[in-house]
Structures are given as C-alpha cells and as structure tokens.
Image: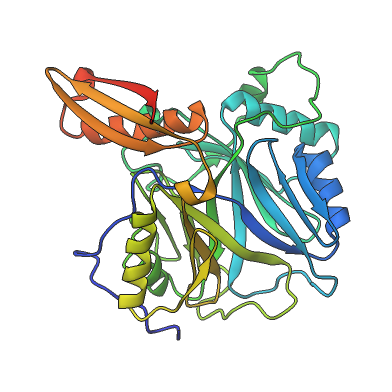
Amino acid sequence: MSLSETHSDPRTAAVLPVTLRLGAVHLTVADVDRSVAWYQQALGLRVHRHDIGEAELGDGVETVVVLHEDPRARPAGRHAGLYHYALLYPSREELARAAVRLAATRTPIQGASDHRTHEAIYLADPDGNGIELAADFPREDWPAALGYDRGPAPLDPDSLLATVAGEQPTPHVAEGLRMGHLHLHVGDVDQGLAFYRDVLGFELQANLGSAAFVSAGGYHHHLGFNVWNGRGAGPAPAHTAGLRHWTVQLPTDADVAEVRARAAAAGVVTAPVDGGFSVRDPWQTAVEFASTAATGLKSRAAVATAGEDTLTITAYAQTPADLTRVEHVIGSHLERFGRRDELTVNFAPLP
C-alpha cells in the first residue's frame, strides 16, 4: 500500500480489546552468536532456543526476543523502522536488579527517565537496536494526562536502587518479563494514526505533533511512533539491522478475525501466519496479530462483583502479574463511573 492510502473515521472506528498484550519482537542482527552472548550477559535473558542463524530469548517461560541473523545487515540509518522496544519488568525491584546487572557488566546506557507512568532505562544492543527497560508504577498512581502534558523527568537512580540495596547482581532475569511496548520511526504521524488507530483499532493517548502514542485499555502506550528521523522517511533498505516484525496477542480467534476484516475493508493487504495474520504499515514495518488460544497461553476468568450485581469478564493472561494488569484496566474503567470502591475482583481458572 502507498503512504497515503490508509484512512478511516476515528469517530466510528472499532477498538482493540482491553486485554490485548504484546508478544515477542523479531529482530535482524548481523551475528546471532554475538547477540545471544550480549543479551545473556547484559540483560540476563535466558536462551530458549539457539540454532544456526536464529535464537529465542526470554525469562525462561515466555519468549520476548527472537533474533534472526543476516551477515550482511548494517546499522539502521535515517529511515522508518524500530526506535526501541520495551522490556517490561514485573516490579520496580526487578528493574533495579536489571540496573545493577548493567553496572556489574559495564554495559553502557543511553539515558534514563521517569515518565510518571513508568520508569525507563535506555540502551542499544550490539547492532544498534534500541531497547527500553521499564517498570510500570501502580496504575492508580498514573497522572490524569499520563504525563504526556509535562514530558519525562530524570530517573532517580538512588530511589530505584534502594529497593534492592545490599543485593548482589543476579545472572538471570526473574520470571515475569514481558514485552511492554514498541516505539517506531515513521514518515508521518497522521498517516501513522490513520493506520494504527483508525484501521487496526489502537486508541490515541497523546498526539504531540512529532510523535503519537496509542494503546488498548487505557494503557499509557503499547505503541509510539515519531518522525524524529525526518518527515517523509521511507522504509528501511534491505539488509538493515532492526525490526522484522512485532506481535500483538488478542484474546480470541474472533478478535483476530475482526481486525483482519477491518484491514481488508480498508484495502490493506494481509498475509496468513500461524494463529493469525500479518500486516505492514505504510512504511513496511510488519506486525502480526494472533489469538491467545492459538499461541497456547493460559487463560483465566476475571469476575467483578459490585454490590448485588455480578459482572463476569473473560480475560487472558499467562501469569498473575499479567492478570494484575488486567485488574488495573478493569478498575480504571469502573473508576470513571465512580464505582471503584464497590469493586472486588477475583480470578479463577477457566474450565
């Protein structure tokens, strides 16, 4: 599709499920063995699979990064593609342990910020792929405008490291690491919104002119995109290190089919993949949509009881930490109607 073909009316566009979660990012690297060693040492990721030219890494339970070797790959230039991906730690303490590990391995960082919704440490892998290490603050502590009206503050490293004072560096990341969000370079923010919001169904959280942030369920952002590589930036050339594709996991096959139908109705070409479909944005950055059932993730039911009335909400997650995030989403929506104090949420396995 061309850079000007994606459009729909944001006032009537459907939205993605609030229980959306992100899956693994697939990256192109020049030397997979070098990258695996770096991800193990610097980030403490566990190797789930390491074959010739390809590897999967994560927390020992869920894969968050898949590496694909292209010996001809060169660092990215001023074009569309990956700005950074964010590894989301299950707690502030785990982010602090990641920071201790970076210091112990003398891994250079590029910056650190307090975004008021989350704390973040920025760095790059050996191929220049941007990485954010992040931990969310409790959702009830997020500011009304999600902090976008004020911009980020400097991270307070003393406060962060105080949460694990006296601990020795740990060699491996703990269970609970997940993909938090993606941030992309694009050639035009409005065209990005026309695709990611109006067609795919992400909801706008902030449009800063040179960057926009979208999400599902009121999250601060599952996706950001900017024109900081230049307005009108085009697709990445062949043999460029960076993002091959990223992954969105939806609760059911029906949810996936609905998004695919919206894309087809907008004239966007889709391609089948295991458990779902893939689609490319106007700058040829690929995203795959798959259902929780198709990817084999465990599911549980969230039951919200308010007074004498019972509201049953089906949610999908793999860990208690993921279910906690779902509870925060439910609570934040009910809070808008002044019913937060009446809400209790219980989780039980789905049959």
Image quadrant holding the N terminus, namely bottom left
Residue 61 location (% of width, % of height): 65, 36
Tell me where residue 117 sits by quadrant. Answer: top left
Residue at point 56%, 30% (across, down): 90
Question: Number of marks in the image?
Answer: 0
> What is the residue that sits farthest to the top in this orientation?
166
Residue 263 location (% of width, % of height): 36, 72
Image quadrant holding the C terminus, namely top left
Please say whether residue 350 is visible from this viewpoint: yes
Q: Is 242 left, or right, of 83 in this rendering?
A: right
Colour scheme employed for the rendering of this structure: rainbow
Please say whether residue 107 is visible from this viewpoint: no
Q: Is 217 left, or right, of 323 in this rendering?
A: left
Residue 78 location (% of width, % of height): 65, 74
| Above or below, 136 relative to 34 | above
Q: Is 171 left, or right, of 58 in this rendering?
A: right
Question: 95 or 330, which lies in front?
Answer: 330
Residue at point 68%, 18% (across, down): 164
Residue at point 81%, 41% (across, down): 40
| Above or below, 273 relative to 319 | below
Residue 42 location (% of width, % of height): 80, 41
Q: Is 308 left, or right, of 299 in this rendering?
A: left
